[in-house]
Image (cartoon, grey):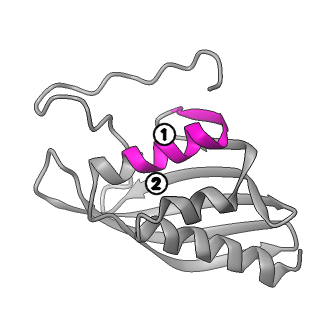
Amino acid sequence: MTAEDAQRLARDLLEAFNAADWERCREMIATSVSYEEAPSGYRARESNAALERLQNIRAAAPDLRGVADHWVVSPDNSAVAAVLTWTHADDPDRVESLGTLLLRMEEGRLTMLHETHITRPHGTAMCIPLDPRRPSGTPPQPPSLGEPQ
């Protein structure tokens, strides 16, 4: 891959996520993938679990949109700073955060996606996804850091 290919793949993934185009996302993610969210500690090691997590993020924040702000790319890697805005299903206040995605690609597919988010203006490290199946008003449970999925 070229650096331009790596940037295109990262941009395409962000666009597919914004559109909730899960089949397109699936095509871009390698079967064996390292997916990690730094603030929540969530980890997945295969594409179905990573895709399910992306779908849960969308369910928890249906209007979430990411817009790439800065790129650093090499032939097989991409780092993206993106501005993310959303309204969480349990909280009517609009939130904006700066998200950082670190991506690694092999043979045109994502093999690593590590993300973190910093909420503006407070600078608190956080992660968007909460379990959308959690009843409204109940506190979120910490993620299990047991065996990778």
Residue type (three-letter) at the residue carrying disc 1: Pro
Quadrant assignment, res 122: bottom left
Q: Are discs 1 and 2 less than 8 Å apart at CB?
A: yes
Answer whether residue 32 is magenta in the image: no
Q: State left or right for residue 100 relative to residue 27.
A: left
| Disc 1 from disc 2: Cα separation | 8 Å
Compared to residue 141, the image places residue 23 above or below, namely: below
Residue in the image at 18% along x and 49% along y: 89
Q: State left or right for residue 66 relative to residue 87.
A: right
Residue in the image at 69% along x and 80% along y: 8
Quadrant assignment, res 95: bottom left
The residue identified by callout 1 is 39
- Let me know if residue 117 appears in the view: yes
Residue type (three-letter) at the residue carrying disc 2: His
Quadrant assignment, res 103: bottom right
Compared to residue 133, the image places residue 88 above or below, namely: below
- Let me know if residue 37 appears in the view: no
Circle 1 residues within 10 Å: few <14, some 14–19, many ≥20: some
SS at mark 2? Answer: strand
The residue identified by callout 2 is 117
Of the numbered discs 1 and 2, the one sitting upstream in the chain is: 1
The percent position of residue 129, horizontal first and vertical second, equals 37, 43
Answer whether residue 47 is magenta in the image: yes
The percent position of residue 130, horizontal first and vertical second, equals 33, 38
Q: Which residues are magenta?
A: 41-56
Circle 2 residues within 10 Å: few <14, some 14–19, many ≥20: many
